[in-house]
Image: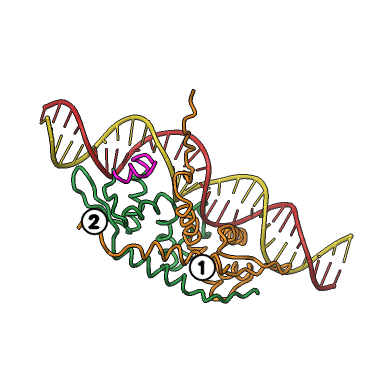
Chain colours: A orange, B green, C yellow, D red
Amino acid sequence: MFFDYVCIMGVTKTEIFTEQQNRIADLAKAFAHPARVAILQLLIARKACVCGDLVDELELAQATVSQHLKELKRIGLIQGEINPPRVCYCINPPVWEEARQAFGSILESFKGVTCCN
Amino acid sequence: MFFDYVCIMGVTKTEIFTEQQNRIADLAKAFAHPARVAILQLLIARKACVCGDLVDELELAQATVSQHLKELKRIGLIQGEINPPRVCYCINPPVWEEARQAFGSILESFKGVTCCN
DNA sequence: ACATTATATCGCAATATTACGATTAAAAAA
DNA sequence: TTTTTTAATCGTAATATTGCGATATAATGT
């Protein structure tokens, strides 16, 4: 009988990594596209909060911006307050703090010691 | 005559973003997969430096690990010292410092002030 | 009711990423 | 010289991501 592990090609094997590693990877995804970096920077600068303003500032179609906002919302880094017919987006402080801690932790863990030199 | 802008589907429009935004996105990609997070953590812990050791520790095929190492090398976060027939990998301090600055800068720029509350 | 406004979602096209077996390459050991 | 060891690369399969036009949705104004 075979209950062999089957690898589904093209899919990240999240099961073999720790919760922390998967979470860091997910948080990093938020910053892994220049459009999302730009959106986060705009939200922090508070110049644009409403989705339409972001569409104006970025040279991307409304559907594309909406999709990036959805991804940032899924990760938790931003929240959207519905104010019909507009939606006002902003940074979600607790998750932003989580990202700060997570990246800080891993980035500070390297003390400049390399093994091959 | 039409020299209209043609969007190549599926490709990030890097031209419309700043150098800094594109670089942050690229650096973030290094952390945007749990396997690469695990590799970086292992390299920092110095338990495994040789590619084969990483393959043993991670439950991934040698070809897969090699591919992730190649991506980390492309971004610049790690370097590989050839020591035939082995290759010893380690963190690349200047680029690691660049990542520390880049993430620190954006993560600290949010002062807890949101526009919709 | 109907038009307007702002955003989300759908569907599609195309490239990017992930994973791995098989093969190649390069140096050391036999 | 042949074998062994270690890592890179190739080729392939499959899912993920990116981008956008078109459409749907939902509340407001007329």
Label for residue B114? none
Name the image quarter holding residue A82: bottom right
Give the chain letter at badge 1: A
- Is residue B37 shown left or right of residue A66? left
Give the chain letter at badge 2: A
Q: Amino acid at mark 2?
A: Cys
SS at circle 1: helix
- Is residue B20 shown left or right of residue B47? right
Q: Residue at x 36, y 55 (%)?
A: B41
Give the residue at mark 2.
A115
Q: Which residues are magenta?
A: B53-64
Quarter of the image for the C terminus of chain B: give it: bottom right
SS at circle 2: loop
Pointer 2 or 1: first along the chain: 1
- Is residue A95 shown left or right of residue D2? right
- The answer to if A97 sits in the magenta stretch is no
Where residue B76 sits in the image (x, y, percent)? 32, 59
Give how far apart the Cα atoms at labels 2 and 1 are. 32 Å
Give the residue at mark 1.
A97
Q: Residue at x 62, y 58 (%)?
A: A63
In the rendered image, the vertical position of residue A8 relative to residue A64, given as above or below = above
Q: Amino acid at mark 1?
A: Glu
